[in-house]
Amino acid sequence: QQQVKQSPQSLIVQKGGIPIINCAYENTAFDYFPWYQQFPGKGPALLIAIRPDVSEKKEGRFTISFNKSAKQFSLHIMDSQPGDSATYFCAASMGGNEKLTFGTGTRLTIIP
Amino acid sequence: KAGVTQTPRYLIKTRGQQVTLSCSPISGHRSVSWYQQTPGQGLQFLFEYFSETQRNKGNFPGRFSGRQFSNSRSEMNVSTLELGDSALYLCASSFNRAGGAGAQYFGPGTRLTVL
């Protein structure tokens, strides 16, 4: 019940396309859902986060869509660029608790 | 503001030894969490410290321990190292405002190799 399931494991998209990464959770006590981007040799960098009281949040080219009834959330990257090639992780936490439960990651490749 | 810093960046140890890793959070952040990242298990939560107290602990053996100092800097220690402890150890800090989990910012990690 503590898991966060992430798909796909890897994704190849042409420059300018819109990669979509999906995550699903079981525990309805989760109330904070961040997305992280990680480049090789670096720590994860916070991209964008959402709470269950909104269905969508945009920050620059990154959008989170949140479906509370389906217990799913997804990351969309608009106008994707080769520099967006990285591993993306979804995560979840609950009740003001700093413990993040991470998805398994998606390796995204944007081809020119 | 300076980001989260971790030292050392790389460590090589042998089985049975112990190791101490250090983390300096973003200025003003009071919560420090530690994560282990491996190709097989992904990112797993170790523990979290707030105001020098451990608030949360993940599912790791007692060989993994940590502490936090009054200036919010944190250390984690792994005793009796095993080959499976080879991993990237990540520290994250947050302000942890009241009413909800705060945004967590990660450091670059310490790459531990156990031979």
Image (cartoon, coloured by chain):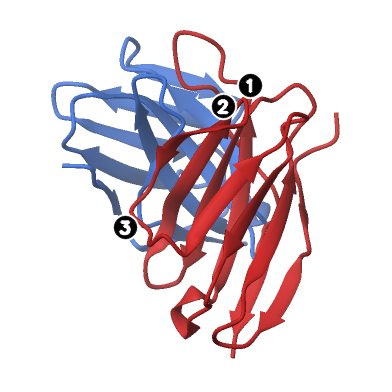
Chain colours: A blue, B red
Q: CA distance from mark 2 to mark 3?
A: 25 Å
* Residue at point 34%, 20% (across, down): A95
Question: In which quarter of the view is residue A27 placed?
Answer: top left
Q: Secondary structure at mark 3?
A: loop
Query: What chain does mark 3 sit on?
Result: A
Closer to the eye: label 2 or 3: 2
Chain letter of mark 2 equals B
Instruction: State the residue position of label 3.
Output: A8
The residue wearing badge 1 is: B95
Residue B72 vertical position relative to residue B14 in the rendered view, above or below:
above
Q: Are marks 1 and 3 in contact (CB under 8 Å)?
A: no
Q: Nearer the viewer, mark 1 or mark 3?
A: 1
Q: Residue at x 34, y 36 (%)?
A: A74
Amino acid identity at mark 3: Pro
Residue B104 falls left or right of residue B3: left
> For residue B103, which numbered disc appears in the image?
2
Same chain, labels 1 and 3: no
Left or right: B68 with respect to B87? right
Q: Which mark is residue A26?
A: none
Q: Secondary structure at mark 1?
A: loop
Pointers 1 and 2 in contact (C-beta within 8 Å): yes
